[in-house]
């Protein structure tokens, strides 16, 4: 690891802490004035999108209670799919989606376990879930049922395909509803090649922020009216929204997938360099930047060539200009081209690998990454959420709760006695 990841930058970034340690520090430090301080959130969800939304609200100051079954949420062991550890003392995949929360484990199949959830919701401002609507209705947790009891509650739900239509009850994952049905997997592959290989969480993390934005808008309105709101965000629509430019353009003949050798604009394309790396050129204003790009590439002889100087001139024959660029880019290493294009103030970047990002100075000095010291004794690098608040101050990282880690604390805070808690534990209503 470079110096960016191992020395000075680590010393100024927050490391992970457990809730008990957070409380001890809180007694010694002045409050930072978290933006959502005083907001209570109950999360009944699994996997990525809804838990990440609750985590974001927790970072912004809300008190978040994650409700899990007695055996724990099904995403806890899923880090193994991506070669990550999944122990209680080191579970970076689960932690990324569930930090800054307190955890309670309930048996929702028993009357008392369900009653605890109801009591938690009664005291909450926001209820976040990705449970499918039909299951919520069977459990008495639908928006309509909760609105009748708690008219000030903000109900926030992650969906696969939306509230209506023939597919509204299908299971929704970002691989299927977002990538595949949403037009990403097939359209953004090289023409003639296999479909794009998806990576987990890309759609889910977009949904998390969309839902968080909706919740914040509803909280603002609630301060005026005292009334709650129903907020839904679907993976399918998020993909359509994300591809809005291209879905609009396809109506006018702009069809994908395309070959990178025959793109609409050769200055918006990837090129391979001498050292085998790929880079992205994004000089979108072709006509204005044509001469500047030619100079940077060492082809000033083409600057005044009317055959290539405008997009209109190369319309229907962009492959020839792509070939010209390919012949130049393959003559130098990617870092040489980076230096040339940056001096020319032209948008150009190396297509980075994830492991390179872990050592990128730009990522460290902007707090995109932080060092984590796991209870296992191991250290790692965590990714931070992208929204920054100047006056609120830095966001601490509190490790995701263990299964039922705060069950007793939470129940005592809402009026249950120690004896009642012990009885429910013995009866396996809670953990």
Image (spheres, rainbow, N blue to C red):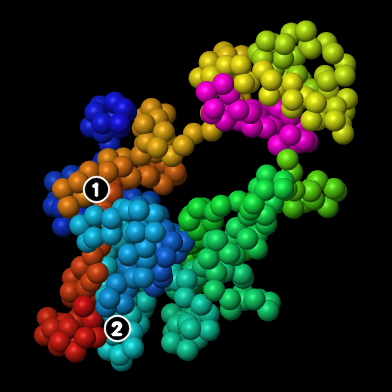
Disc 1: which residue? 16
Name the residue furthest left.
419
Q: Is residue 22 visible?
A: no
Q: Is residue 412 visible?
A: yes
Question: What residue is shown with label 2?
Answer: 107
Mark closest to the chain's N terminus, 2 or 1: 1
On the image, the x and y values in percent for residue 147 come to 49, 80
Pick out the residue farthest to the top: 301
Kindly identify the residue that appears in the image at 83 percent across and 52 percent down: 251
Answer with left or right where residue 170 lies relative to residue 269.
Answer: left
Residues shaded magenta: 260-283
Tell me residue 421's x, y (percent): 16, 82
Would you call the spot at circle 2 few (<14 residues within 10 Å), some (14-19), or many (20 or more)?
many
Helix, strand or loop at disc 1?
strand
**Residue at the location (23% across, 60% down)?**
87
Q: Quadrant of the N terminus?
A: top left
For the residue labelled by badge 2, is the local secondary structure a helix, a strand or a loop? loop
The extreme bottom residue here reads 111
Q: Using the image as rendered, state which of residue 73 and residue 162 is in the foreground.
A: 73
Quadrant of res 174: bottom right
Circle 1 residues within 10 Å: few <14, some 14–19, many ≥20: many
Verify whether residue 272 appears in magenta: yes
Query: Which quadrant is the C terminus positioned in?
Result: bottom left
When the figure is inspected, residue 416 is found, relative to residue 251, above or below; the finding is: below
Residue displayed at 83% across by 10% down? 304
Residues tagged 2 and 1 counted as in contact (Cβ below 8 A):
no
Residue 120, image x and y in percent? 32, 76
The residue nearer to you, when weighing 321 against 30, is 321
Disc 2 from disc 1: Cα separation? 29 Å
Residue at the spot 12% in from the left edge and 81% down from the top edge: 418
């Amino acid at each position: 690891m470079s110096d960016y990841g191992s020395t000075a930058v680590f010393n100024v970034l927050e490391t992970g802490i457990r809730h008990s340690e957070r409380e001890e520090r809180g007694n010694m430090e002045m409050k930072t004035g978290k933006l959502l301080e005083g907001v209570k959130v109950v999360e009944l969800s699994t996997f990525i999108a809804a838990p990440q939304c609750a985590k974001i609200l927790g970072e912004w100051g809300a008190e978040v209670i994650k409700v899990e079954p007695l055996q724990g949420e099904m995403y806890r062991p899923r880090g193994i799919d991506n070669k990550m550890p999944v122990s209680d003392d080191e579970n970076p995949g689960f932690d990324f989606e569930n930090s800054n929360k307190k955890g309670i484990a309930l048996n929702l199949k028993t009357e008392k376990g369900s009653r605890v959830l109801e009591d938690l919701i009664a005291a909450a401002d926001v209820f976040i879930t990705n449970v499918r609507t039909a299951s919520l209705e069977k459990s008495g947790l639908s928006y309509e049922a909760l609105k009748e009891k708690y008219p000030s509650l903000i109900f926030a739900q992650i969906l696969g395909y939306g509230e209506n239509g023939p597919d509204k009850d299908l299971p929704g994952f970002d691989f299927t509803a977002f990538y595949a049905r949403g037009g990403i997997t097939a359209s953004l592959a090289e023409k003639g090649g296999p479909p794009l290989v998806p990576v987990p969480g890309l759609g889910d993390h977009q949904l998390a922020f969309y839902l968080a934005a909706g919740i914040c808008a509803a909280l603002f309105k609630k301060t005026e009216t005292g009334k709650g709101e129903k907020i839904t965000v679907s993976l399918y629509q998020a993909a359509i929204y994300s591809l809005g430019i291209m879905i609009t353009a396809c109506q006018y003949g702009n069809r994908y997938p395309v070959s990178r050798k025959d793109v609409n604009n050769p200055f918006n394309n990837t090129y391979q360099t001498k050292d085998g790396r790929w880079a992205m050129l994004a000089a979108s204003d072709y006509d204005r930047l044509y001469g500047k790009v030619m100079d940077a590439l060492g082809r000033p002889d083409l600057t005044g060539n009317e055959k290539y100087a405008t997009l209109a001139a190369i319309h229907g024959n962009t492959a020839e200009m792509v070939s010209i660029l390919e012949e130049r880019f393959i003559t130098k290493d990617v870092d040489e081209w980076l230096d040339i294009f940056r001096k020319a103030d032209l948008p150009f970047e190396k297509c980075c690998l994830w492991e390179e990002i872990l050592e990128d100075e730009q990522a460290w000095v902007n707090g995109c990454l932080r060092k984590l010291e796991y209870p296992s004794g191991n250290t790692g690098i965590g990714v931070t959420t992208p929204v920054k608040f100047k006056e609120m101050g830095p966001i601490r990282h509190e490790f995701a709760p263990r299964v039922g880690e705060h069950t007793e604390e939470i129940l005592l805070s809402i009026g249950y006695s120690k004896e009642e808690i012990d009885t429910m534990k013995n009866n396996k209503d809670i953990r």
